Image: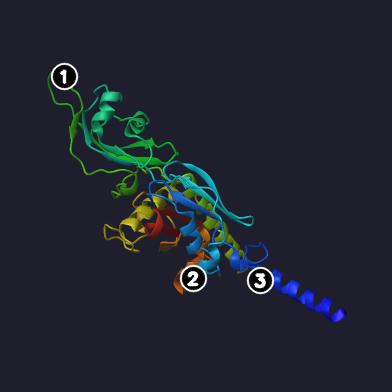
Amino acid sequence: MKGKRYAWSLLGLFIMHSDTFLPSSFDVRYSLVQDEIHVEYGSMKSFDPYQYLLENRHALSQANQLHFPIRGAVDVKKLGEYDITYAQDLKLHVVVEDTTAPSVSLSALSLTQNESFEWDEKTLKAIVQDLNDNETDSQTLSERFHCDDVDTTKSGAQKVQCQTEDNSGNQAVALLSVQVNAKTAGRSKVSTPVITRSSETADRSISTTSNTTVIPQAAYSATEMRQIREVAILINQIRTEHGLSPLTLEIGKYHQVGYIRALEVASKYSHTRPNGKPCYTVFSDYGLSFQSSGENIARGQQSARQVVDDWMNSPAHRANILRPEFTYIVIGVTGNGTNKYWIQEFFS
């Protein structure tokens, strides 16, 4: 009798074990590769939870995955947070967000020295060649569009910063070319601004003219700023582990110029700038000095952890991260998906 009870016990254990294809928080094989993902608004037509399950499980056959009923849906055409449940311990949190800054293209502006000038709705509308966004309508962008004051007391060329903001807080910053012409002799007359064609563009292609003193504001989204800070934290953890002093994350003028460098890297993936100059000249072009500097760039990584790991696995990039003489760091990120670009600018 005792032998029969033992046999039934073994059979019971076998039956329990045969059911372990169902998800368990104690079995990492059946967990999702990522349990939270961020989807850029407008980047896809639809989101298929089952396809994500097939592509992002650890060690589970497609046949066994059919046992998981899916509850919940994601509306990629509406910003928000969504929860998908595959089973009790298998869940996915999806954030549909807009981290893409608006696109702005401006015409140049010509004025006469010492003439009275103030921005009004008509003039602001006249200098805008193109204003659009992936989520916010053009009318809303136009209502939020504004430019800094123009100094008409001195003749010559000026760069004036203009900007707008979408519903998610992403800012587009553009430099407007303003030519203030010297007043000619004789009777003057009041004139309306003359709009001429210009190649000045906004946000993701900010002008980097040498010797200018105007530093455009960095247009990072809230998500990008969070990733920038995450990279800084990870870098300083690594430096501390190697007995080095942590780096100060610069979020002032160097940070703003670093945004320009991020846009340049997205335009030309190289340590040589699009204008042919070395990477470090982007700071001196805006009147910012340093004693020593180094640059790391990367593309395609989707998270702070991934890009830092890739840099640390590369001897040259690792060397920059662990240089003891550096005291400051500027971090930049722009783009999405495989076209996501990262920069690190080290200096002292």
Q: Nearer the viewer, residue 155 or 128?
A: 128
10 Å neighbourhood of mark 2: few (<14), some, or many (≥20)? Answer: few
Disc 2/disc 3 C-alpha distance (Å) = 50 Å
Seen at 42% across and 58% down, the residue is 342
Seen at 26% across and 27% down, the residue is 123
Image x and y of residue 152, in percent: 27, 28
**What secondary structure is marked by label 2?**
helix
Give the residue type at disc 2.
Ala
Q: Is 239 displayed left or right of 330 in the figure?
A: right
Disc 1/disc 2 C-alpha distance (Å) = 63 Å
Residue highlighted by disc 1: 189
Colour scheme of the rendered structure = rainbow
**What secondary structure is marked by label 1?**
loop
Residue 18, disc: 3
* Mark 1 or 2, nearer chain start: 1
Residue highlighted by disc 2: 319
